[in-house]
């Protein structure tokens, strides 16, 4: 089932125009929600970011956020899953191809649900990562459809036998191709501040809350590749990746090459947050 412009329809009933500006220009936004135990995780934070992204690209939403939220709930009732994702995409409209905004046109809304198991092996064992230059534009804080640099980086990481790419601008580490990034030194978590150079991750926000609750110090400031090379631990955070340890970077082990104690504490706290969501009792 797919939510298409306010109606829940079968997949084969969806028709996207070849003049859709999302197709022609990547002129649109999206959100990916995690579903745990049939419940949307951090629903309000995702909806707030969707609204912020729309405002940032001057895209007029066809419904209020509350109405969109109601439609997503209807979609979940029509296609219930225990563990999965809900994807929503909103493009500006279909219109004759022209770089300038069209004078008229209705936004196109598509949303669908897919089952997706939790990444248990990666959470337990960690993954390898590689570093590469961040060649993206300067508004990474907008969750737009313009993801080709991310796609190329992710594929290069996979081609090099790694699970994720860690971006850096010059020597400054920013984030990963599809997740936020944190390094740990002497028990302190370091992460790039939430500027225009990184996506303001919902899971990143949860992680910062959990760190405060656990008494784990977090420093939000830029750090460089030299600092990263001396890190005791490293991990990424994301909607589908949760809190995944990074045990090796560019073929060299991080710390002792195993998930570290700070990462494990945050994973355990996150697990409790997930269980509360699945139980219908978000913290």
Image (cartoon, rainbow, N blue to C red):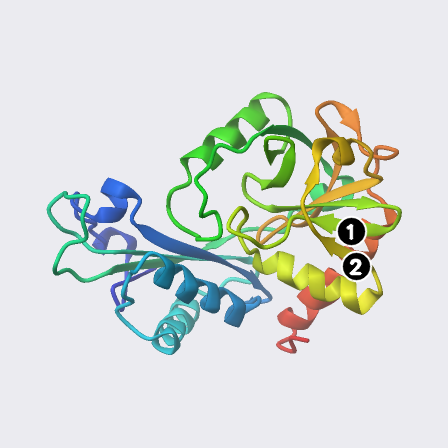
Q: Quadrant of residue 8?
A: bottom left
Q: Nearer the viewer, residue 144 or 128?
A: 144
Instruction: Tell me if label 2 and label 1 are in contact, CB under 8 Å.
Output: no
Residue at 19% x, 44% y is 99
* Residue at image mark 1: 189
* Residue at image mark 2: 268
- For the residue carrying disc 2, how many other residues have a C-alpha within 10 Å: few (<14), some (14-19), or many (20+)? some
Q: Is residue 142 left or right of residue 19?
A: right
Query: Which is in the foreground here, disc 2 or disc 1?
Result: 1
Q: Name the element at disc 2.
A: helix
Q: Is residue 30 left or right of residue 248?
A: left
Residue at 12% x, 59% y is 103
Q: Is residue 30 left or right of residue 184?
A: left
Q: Is residue 166 above or below residue 216?
A: above
Residue at 82% x, 34% y is 230
Residue at 42% x, 40% y is 147
Q: Is residue 238 above or below residue 249?
A: below
Q: Is residue 57 above or below residue 126?
A: below
Q: Quadrant of the N terminus?
A: bottom left
Q: Quadrant of residue 102?
A: bottom left
Q: Nearer the viewer, residue 273 or 78?
A: 273
Q: Spatial distance from mark 2 to mark 1, Cα to Cα? A: 16 Å
Residue 283: x percent and y percent? Answer: 68, 76
Q: Nearer the viewer, residue 262 or 198?
A: 198
Residue 252: x percent and y percent? Answer: 78, 24
């Amino acid at each position: 089932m797919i939510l298409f412009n306010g109606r829940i329809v079968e997949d084969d009933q969806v028709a996207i125009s070849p003049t859709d500006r999302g197709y022609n220009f990547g002129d649109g936004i999206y959100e990916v929600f995690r579903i745990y135990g049939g419940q949307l995780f951090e629903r309000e934070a995702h909806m707030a970011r969707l609204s912020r992204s729309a405002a940032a690209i001057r895209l007029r939403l066809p419904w209020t956020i509350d109405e969109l939220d109601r439609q997503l709930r209807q979609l979940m009732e029509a296609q219930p899953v225990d563990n999965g994702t809900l994807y929503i995409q909103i493009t500006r409209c279909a219109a004759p191809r022209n770089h300038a905004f069209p004078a008229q046109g209705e936004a196109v809304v598509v949303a669908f649900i897919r089952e997706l198991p939790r990444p248990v092996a990666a959470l337990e064992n960690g993954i390898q990562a590689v570093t590469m230059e961040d060649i993206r534009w300067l508004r990474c804080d907008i969750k737009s459809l313009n993801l080709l640099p991310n796609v190329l980086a992710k594929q290069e990481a996979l081609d090099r036998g790694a699970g994720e790419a860690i971006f850096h601008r010059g020597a400054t580490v920013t984030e990963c191709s599809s997740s936020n990034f944190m390094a740990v030194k002497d028990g302190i978590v370091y992460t790039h501040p939430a500027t225009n150079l990184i996506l303001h991750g919902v899971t990143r926000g949860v992680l910062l809350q959990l760190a405060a609750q656990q008494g784990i110090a977090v420093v939000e400031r830029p750090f460089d590749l030299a600092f990263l090379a001396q890190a005791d631990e490293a991990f990424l955070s994301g909607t589908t990746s949760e809190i995944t340890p990074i045990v090796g970077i560019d073929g060299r082990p991080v710390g002792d090459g195993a998930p570290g104690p700070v990462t494990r504490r945050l994973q355990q706290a996150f697990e409790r947050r997930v269980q509360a969501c699945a139980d219908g009792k978000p913290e």
